Structure formats: structure tokens, C-alpha cells
């Protein structure tokens, strides 16, 4: 897309979400049993947003990831509920990158048309997602496939997913496989999360048999696929946080202009002004960070070296997700007491930003990845 | 356009290859080899060496200009190339890969003074000064800050009084980089006695060799001398050296200041040594490369430097020609923060070796960085002024109400 088309997409997304998923609706869904609005999701599917950067052969539009990135940020900005990112961006990314073209051909089109919801299950206890920290484990099965055991945590939208893309660790390395959520031995236990605009669950695997035809990656390429998928997820979280950061700065600036104390707008006090100026700096720096990350995980572009991709993504994930939390905290302080109330929207942004910080690798882990690239140690280190 | 740039690069490379050799070790990666200096300000202790370096730089600058690479974005009538200003940046980046005499003394003229002259000066002023600034014939300095006018620059007191075809200028300026080398000074002086403070200022170009100009070096906390005080005692400046109409000096100089912030923030003016690479080398050398806390700090340092670099490139592409706004303030704040944090990490890695010279390569050398870093938060507008600018220009927050005149 050209820059002008991208701007138009952003305006459309902002308008659609303001009309169909305004704050009142977001709040209704906080305690909803499903946790999202299937009508809204159907609208987003119709708009083509579930397949933007996916190949045309799968029903997608084949545009750059940077175009989907615009939509992801708008979803964060509007704190929208729903499985667009978990299914059509992250799980679909795993399928698109897999060498199992049969599974790709089977599943991508139904993810794009919204009839199937998929999600990735990989994180171990504490949400860590390095190869060594994966929750699920695998062993070979008699039929040439694998048997999966263990628990994956922080699985987004698992309760409404039809299909799970599971990453599991084993003696020989990491594998990935497609598993039906209804498969015997799979149980989904919803997690109570700080951010109520999204749903996550623990998924337990109890001797789940996976056939050879369902394998997305074998031990020789599993770890590389895992890193790519974690990078897509991390980029999506950074984009979501970027949307939050941007709107929270705008809303805070509007508030401090109209809030009067001591006979003047509190926005004229340097104590307020300087904090917001620092937040503008975080937003503008975050903007280049997410753009770099979005370019790095593009499915169609010439792949970057792993080093460049990891640096771009890990940098963005740590920097932008931290920035959004800082900005939300600053916003709370600038709003004073009103910002601390349930009725005020600040806590919705704050909590979503905090969950983004935790999903697909903590800031600390991503900085660790950056350090491993710029200052490699002789022995590999991946402790967190 | 892309083709133009490729073709331009090829011709610039041909010129550079013919007249200079490539830098041997552009990133300075080799630990313990060569000069370990790492600082934020150039500063010669030896004035004779400095003057000699200036002459070498001038000779190179002339060669570049006479071969058509000195001012690509400038109008052909003034000796410029009549092409895109972006090509000047392209050339600068290419030239950095070659071992050429220091061009830093000319940057004030080309990057800060020239844009203000081009935007505000009469044809006559432009013709007399602009080619010289770009050809290295004229080294410029900025006569802006005063002892009583720092952040509140518009409160400056240096006065220019009309006398026939001339102005008589008296006052004191401070923090003037390279005043001792400069041929001309960009002066901001009060010309309207009654006008409100911002509107009573006018910009002039002063011949620094005029009678009544006295330059006194100012030694800064690094121990070196980078800045000067400049005393102006009834200095005669012809009216033909006035830049723009009477009372227009503030807006002319603000354009310069924005450019300066962007220049300071982009790090364009700083040493060729990459501080983060140096910190990584230091961590290795001191056996701290495996320390998880050090690794986190190095990752942050790397991240911040990379993001600032990308932000600088983006803002450069956005701010066409010479109108950088608050972007410069953002870059400058990022850089001052990074100046401090790199110094902190160095201190963490070095411990006492930062404070006493043990002769260890690349250790005590960091004192120049650490003692130079505070300058980044002050020069070209303090961090606080940058934050005001960002909050007011980007977010539209109201200005601080002006204090009521104290009754006298």
C-alpha cells in the first residue's frame, strides 16, 4: 500500500471501531462469557482485515505486514476484544511460515474467512517462550507423529479457538503441530487476567496424539519457526501497545488543557508539561521501533538475517511495551483522582498495556535477546 | 529520483576515491589499538595544531566545493548545485567513510547560519556570504547567548545603535564555539529600544576581525577549551550586513536554533567513535560480558542508540529543506539522555578506574565523555526548554503565564 492508502486504512479502522466497538461496548464485553463480539469480528472479516498480509492463494490480499500493523495498532487504541490478532496474525503467521503446505492450504483460507479461529499455544510457566521454557513437551509416537503432554499458559482466545498451533520441546528439539481444540486429551482452563478486554487460558495436553500429517515443524526446523512466531506475536503486542501509547498521550493532553486548578489550566504547569513531553518522545521513538519490527516480520519480503530480525523485534517489544505502561502510569498521575476510578477509561489502557508487556516474552527477556546478538557469549546463554 | 541518487553516489565516490583514501577502521572495533579518546566535544589544547588543522580542512572544503559537491542543494546563482538538499546529506555520509581533514569547523556556517541567511537575507548578503560559508572561505560562529540571557534568549541586552550607514554594537556574548577561529559571527542584537522583547531583535553578520571584538576562551569542566566569551565594544557593523528587516531577528534565529537542536540530537556533530560499541568492548575486556545486569544495560544502550538513529533518519526525510520543528527537540532530548546513560554504564563497568588514570586503554578516557555529557542537556536549549517546546508545539499545551510586571 502507498502511504496515502495506509493513512486511509487507518482512518477507516478508527471510524469502524469507533462506531461498532465504542468504549461502552468494550465495557459491556468485560464480563461477557464469550469475551468478544462475533458480529464485530464478522465485520472485520468482511473488511478483509483477517487476511491482509497473507498470500492471495489463501484468500489474503498479499499486502505488507506494515499494512496489517496499522489495523493492529488501531485495535489496541480502541482496546478492542476479539481474536483477529491471535488467529489471523499470529497463528496464521505460523501456518504461513510452515513447510507443511497441506496444512497451510487447508487452514489459512478458513482463518481468513473467519469460519475457523486458531491460536498458538507455547508459553511455559510464567509466560516464557524461549525454546527451553516452552510449556508443552513431545515424544515420538508409534505412528510417526508425536505425543504431546504438559501445559501451555497465556494462550490467547483458547476458549473460542477451533484449532491450536502447539509448540512443544523434546530431547531432539522443538516441534510444532496443529491440534484440534476438541481433540481428546486437550483441556482449556480460562485464566483470570488483569486485562479484561482480552481472554487467555491455560491449555493442558494429556497424551495428545498428533499424526505426522499435522506436524508444522520437525526438530530440525522447529526452533526457527518458534522464533519467527514469537517475533510475530511480540511485534503484534508492541503494535497494540503503540496504539495505546498514542491515544493515552492524546487523551491526557486534552484533559490537562481543560482541567483548571489555581486559576489556570494544569497543562500550563511545567511539572505536567514536561512529563507529557517525555511521553511524546516515547511515542515518537516507539513509532520507528514498531515500523522496524513490522518490516522485519513481513512474510513476503526478502527475509532479513535472523540477527537483524531479532534485534528489530526484541527492541520494539521491550521498548514500546514498557513505554506504553510508563505512559499509562503518567496519565494516571496527570488525571489525579478521576483517573483512579473504574468509570474512567485509563485503567483499561493501563491493564491492556501490562498484559502486552507480559505476552510473547517479557521486556527483560527481549533485552536479553538483543544482548545475545550484540554481545554474543561463547557459551549460549538463555536464562531469563 | 532513486536513479539520480545512485548516479550521484557514483560520481561522489569517484571524486572521493580520486582525492582521499578510505578510513581503515570506521567503527573503531579493535580494542586497545590506536587513540582511545572518547568525548562529546572536540577540543584542542594546542592552538597552533588547531589552526593548522583548520587550514587543512579549508583546503579540502575548497576542493570539494570547486568540484561541485560542496553545496548541492544551493541555488546555482550562488555557486550551489541547484539539486535536492538530500544530496548534501548523501555526500556527507559518503565522505565520512573517507579519511579527510576535519570539516567540523564549517558545520556551524553551513548547517546553522546559512539556512537563516538563505531564508532572510537580501540578495546582496546572500551573494557576499553564502558561497564563502560553503567553500570554507568563511568560518562562522554564533553570537547568541549572553550571561544574562540563556534559556530566556529573547531577554538579551547586546545593543546595536544606528550610526549613518553603520550600526554600533556593544555587549557580551558567551558559549560561542570556535569564535577564536571564526571569520564571521551571526549576531542577535537589540535594535528597537521600545519594541516588545522578541520584536526588538535584529540579526547581523559581524566581521570577527573588526576593531572592538575581543574573544576570550572559556575552559569547560572537561579541562579543555571549546567555547569562548566574546566582548563587543562599540563594534562597527555596516547596515549591508543586516540579515532581514529590523525586528525580524528572533524568528530568523529560531529557525537556526531548531536546526541546531536537530544537528545536536542527530549526533552529526559528534565523534566518529560509537559509544555503544566501545561499551561492549569495555564489558568484554573487563570480564563483565556475562553479567546479566550489564547485558540488560548494554541492550538498552544499543536499543536507544538505534532508535535515535532511525528517528533521526525519519525526521530528516520528513523535514524537507530547513524547517525542522519540535522533531529537533525530541532528538536532542534523546541524545542528552543517552549521553548520560552511556556515561553511567561506563562508570558501572569501570568502577574506580573512571576516576584515576591507571594507564589502562579505554578506561580513564571515559572521563572526557562523562564530563562532557552535561553539555548535551544545556547547549542549544536546555532539556527543560526542549520539553516546553514539545509540549506546546506537539500537544498544544498552554504556555506558562508570563509573570506580572513587578511594580517599580
Image (cartoon, rainbow, N blue to C red):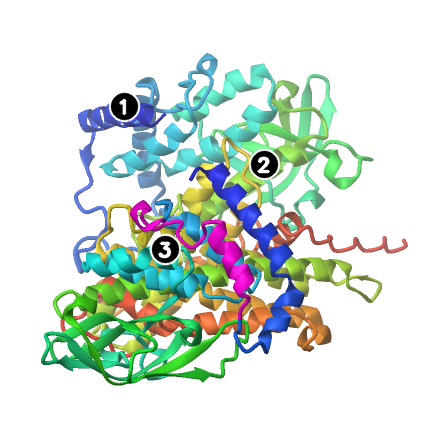
| Magenta-highlighted residues | A36-59
Who's the residue at 17% across and 60% down the image? B32
Image side of residue A170 versus residue A186, left or right: left
Residue bearing mark 3: A293
Q: At which x and y percent is residue A222?
A: 19, 68
Q: At which x and y percent is residue A224?
A: 20, 64
Give the spatial CA distance, label 2 vs label 3. Answer: 34 Å
Q: Nearer the viewer, residue B188 or A192?
A: A192
Q: At which x and y percent is residue A263?
A: 84, 63
Count of numbered labels shown in the rendering: 3
**Quarter residue B47 falls in:** top left
Q: Nearer the viewer, residue A5 or B74?
A: A5
Q: Is residue B205 above or below residue B256?
A: above
Residue bearing mark 1: B7
> Is residue A259 within the magenta segment?
no
For residue B255, which numbered disc appears in the image? 2
Amino acid at each position: 500500500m502507498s502511504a496515502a492508502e495506509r493513512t486511509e486504512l487507518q482512518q477507516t479502522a478508527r471510524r469502524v471501531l469507533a462506531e461498532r466497538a465504542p468504549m461502552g461496548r468494550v465495557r459491556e464485553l468485560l464480563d461477557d462469557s464469550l469475551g468478544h463480539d462475533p458480529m464485530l469480528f464478522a465485520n472485520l472479516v468482511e473488511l478483509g482485515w483477517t487476511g491482509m498480509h497473507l498470500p492471495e492463494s489463501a484468500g489474503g490480499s498479499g499486502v505488507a505486514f506494515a499494512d496489517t500493523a496499522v489495523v493492529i495498532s488501531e485495535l489496541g487504541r480502541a482496546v478492542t476484544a476479539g481474536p483477529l490478532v491471535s488467529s489471523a496474525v499470529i497463528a496464521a503467521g505460523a501456518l504461513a511460515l510452515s513447510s507443511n503446505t497441506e496444512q497451510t492450504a487447508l487452514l489459512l483460507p478458513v482463518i481468513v474467512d473467519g469460519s475457523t479461529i486458531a491460536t498458538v499455544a507455547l508459553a511455559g510457566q510464567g509466560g516464557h517462550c524461549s525454546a527451553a521454557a516452552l510449556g508443552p513437551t513431545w515424544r515420538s509416537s508409534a505412528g510417526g507423529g508425536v505425543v504431546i503432554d504438559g501445559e501451555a499458559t497465556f494462550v490467547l482466545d483458547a476458549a473460542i479457538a477451533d484449532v491450536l498451533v502447539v509448540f512443544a520441546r523434546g530431547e531432539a528439539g522443538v516441534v510444532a503441530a496443529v491440534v484440534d481444540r476438541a481433540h481428546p486429551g486437550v483441556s482449556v482452563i480460562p485464566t483470570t487476567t488483569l486485562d479484561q478486554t482480552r481472554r487467555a487460558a491455560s491449555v493442558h495436553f494429556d497424551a495428545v496424539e498428533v499424526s505426522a500429517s499435522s506436524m508444522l515443524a520437525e526438530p530440525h526446523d522447529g526452533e526457527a519457526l518458534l522464533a519467527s512466531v514469537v517475533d510475530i506475536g511480540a511485534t503484534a503486542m508492541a503494535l497494540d501497545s503503540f496504539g495505546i501509547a498514542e491515544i493515552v498521550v492524546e487523551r491526557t493532553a486534552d484533559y490537562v488543557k481543560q482541567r483548571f486548578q489555581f486559576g489556570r489550566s494544569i497543562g500550563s504547569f511545567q511539572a505536567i508539561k514536561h512529563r507529557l513531553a517525555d511521553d511524546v518522545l516515547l511515542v515518537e521513538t516507539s513509532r520507528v521501533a514498531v515500523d522496524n519490527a513490522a518490516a522485519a516480520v513481513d512474510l513476503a519480503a526478502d527475509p532479513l538475517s535472523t540477527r537483524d530480525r531479532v534485534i528489530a523485534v526484541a527492541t520494539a517489544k521491550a521498548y514500546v511495551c514498557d513505554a506504553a505502561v510508563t505512559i499509562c502510569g503518567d496519565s494516571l498521575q496527570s488525571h489525579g483522582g478521576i483517573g483512579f476510578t473504574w468509570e474512567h477509561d485509563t485503567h483499561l489502557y493501563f491493564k491492556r498495556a501490562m498484559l502486552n508487556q507480559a505476552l510473547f516474552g517479557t521486556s527483560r527477556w527481549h533485552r536479553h535477546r538483543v544482548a545475545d546478538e550484540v554481545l554474543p557469549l561463547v557459551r549460549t546463554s538463555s536464562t531469563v | 529520483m532513486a536513479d539520480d541518487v545512485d548516479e550521484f553516489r557514483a560520481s561522489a565516490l569517484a571524486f572521493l576515491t580520486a582525492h582521499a583514501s578510505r578510513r581503515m577502521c570506521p567503527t573503531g572495533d579493535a580494542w586497545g589499538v590506536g587513540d582511545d579518546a572518547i568525548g562529546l566535544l572536540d577540543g584542542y589544547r594546542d592552538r597552533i595544531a588547531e589552526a593548522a588543522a583548520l587550514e587543512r580542512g579549508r583546503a579540502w572544503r575548497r576542493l570539494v566545493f570547486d568540484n561541485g559537491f560542496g553545496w548541492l542543494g544551493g541555488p546555482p546563482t550562488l555557486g550551489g548545485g541547484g539539486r535536492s538538499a538530500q544530496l548534501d546529506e548523501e555526500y556527507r555520509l559518503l565522505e565520512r567513510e573517507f579519511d579527510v581533514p576535519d570539516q567540523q569547523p564549517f558545520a556551524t556556517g553551513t548547517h546553522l547560519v546559512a539556512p537563516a541567511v538563505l531564508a532572510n537575507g537580501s540578495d546582496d548578503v546572500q551573494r557576499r556570504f553564502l558561497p564563502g560559508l560553503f567553500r570554507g572561505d568563511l568560518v562562522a560562529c554564533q553570537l547568541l547567548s549572553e550571561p544574562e540571557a540563556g534559556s530566556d534568549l529573547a531577554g538579551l541586552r547586546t545593543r546595536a545603535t544606528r550610526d549613518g550607514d553603520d550600526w554600533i554594537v556593544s555587549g557580551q556574548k558567551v558559549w560561542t564555539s570556535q569564535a577564536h577561529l571564526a571569520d564571521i559571527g551571526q549576531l542577535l542584537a537589540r535594535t528597537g529600544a521600545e519594541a516588545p522583547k522578541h520584536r526588538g531583535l535584529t540579526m547581523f553578520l559581524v566581521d570577527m576581525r573588526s576593531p572592538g571584538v575581543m574573544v576570550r576562551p572559556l575552559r569547560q569542566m572537561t579541562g579543555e577549551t571549546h567555547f569562548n566569551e566574546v566582548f563587543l565594544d562599540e563594534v562597527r557593523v555596516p547596515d549591508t550586513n543586516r540579515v532581514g528587516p529590523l525586528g525580524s531577528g528572533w524568528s530568523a534565529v529560531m529557525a537556526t536554533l531548531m536546526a541546531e537542536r536537530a544537528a545536536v540530537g542527530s549526533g552529526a556533530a559528534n565523534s566518529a567513535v560509537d559509544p555503544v560499541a566501545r561499551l561492549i568492548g569495555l564489558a568484554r575486556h573487563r570480564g563483565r560480558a556475562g553479567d546479566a545486569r550489564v547485558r540488560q544495560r548494554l541492550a538498552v544502550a544499543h536499543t536507544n542508540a538505534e532508535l535515535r538513529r532511525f528517528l533521526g533518519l525519519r525526521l530528516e526525510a520528513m523535514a524537507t529543506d530547513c524547517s525542522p520543528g519540535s522533531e529537533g527537540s525530541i532528538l536532542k532530548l534523546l541524545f542528552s539522555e543517552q549521553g548520560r546513560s552511556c556515561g553511567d554504564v561506563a562508570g558501572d563497568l569501570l568502577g574506580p578506574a573512571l576516576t584515576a588514570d591507571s594507564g589502562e586503554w579505554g578506561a580513564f578516557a571515559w572521563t572526557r565523555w562523562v564530563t562532557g555529557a552535561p553539555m548535551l542537556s544545556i547547549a542549544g536549549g536546555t532539556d527543560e526548554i526542549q520539553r516546553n517546546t514539545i509540549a506546546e508545539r506537539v500537544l498544544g499545551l498552554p504556555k506558562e503565564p508570563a509573570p506580572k510586571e513587578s511594580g517599580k
